[in-house]
Image (spheres, rainbow, N blue to C red):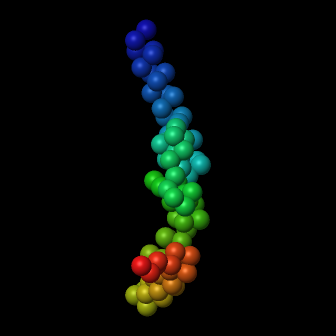
Amino acid sequence: MNYFLKNQAFQSALLVISLADALGVSVDFLAYGNKDDTGNNTKYPLLEEQELIKKYRVLDERGRKAVEDTLEREYEFVNPRREK
C-alpha cells in the first residue's frame, strides 16, 4: 500500500511538471502564481522570449551590441530614472 501511495504521488508530481513545462511556466507559478512586478512569470522565459534568445545567440558582436543598445534605450523609455 505504501508503494502505491508513493508511486501515485510521483505520477502526480510528473503531471504537474509536464503541465508547467507545456505552459512555459514554473511549478511555483502553477501553485502560487508567483510573478514579478511586471506581471511576468519569473522562473522561465516565455516561448517568444526563448526564440529571441536563440536569435541573439547566433548574432556576431556587432549584432549583439545593436540589440543591447536598443534594449537599453527602450528600457529607459518605459522605466525612466527618477531625478531626486
- Expressed as whole percent of the image width and height from the top left, the position of residue 25 reads 53, 50
Residue that extends furthest to the top in the rendered view of this protein = 1
Q: Tag count in the figure?
A: 0
Give 9 or 4, whichever is nearer the viewer: 9
What residue do we see at 54% from left, 34% from top?
Answer: 15
- Expressed as whole percent of the image width and height from the top left, the position of residue 33 reads 54, 44
What residue do we see at 52% from left, 52% from top?
Answer: 35
The N terminus is located in which quarter? top left
Residue that extends furthest to the front in the rendered view of this protein = 84
Residue 20 appears in the picture as rendered: no
Residue 46 appears in the picture as rendered: yes
Q: Is residue 1 left or right of residue 77?
A: left
What residue do we see at 55% from left, 61% from top?
Answer: 38
- In this rendering, the answer to whether 40 lies above or below 13 is below
- Expressed as whole percent of the image width and height from the top left, the position of residue 54 reads 49, 71
- In this rendering, the answer to whether 19 lies above or below 43 is above
The C terminus is located in which quarter? bottom left
Give 9 or 32, whichever is nearer the viewer: 32
- In this rendering, the answer to whether 57 lies above or below 8 is below
Residue that extends furthest to the bottom in the rendered view of this protein = 62
- In this rendering, the answer to whether 46 lies above or below 32 is below
What residue do we see at 40% from left, 87% from top?
Answer: 61
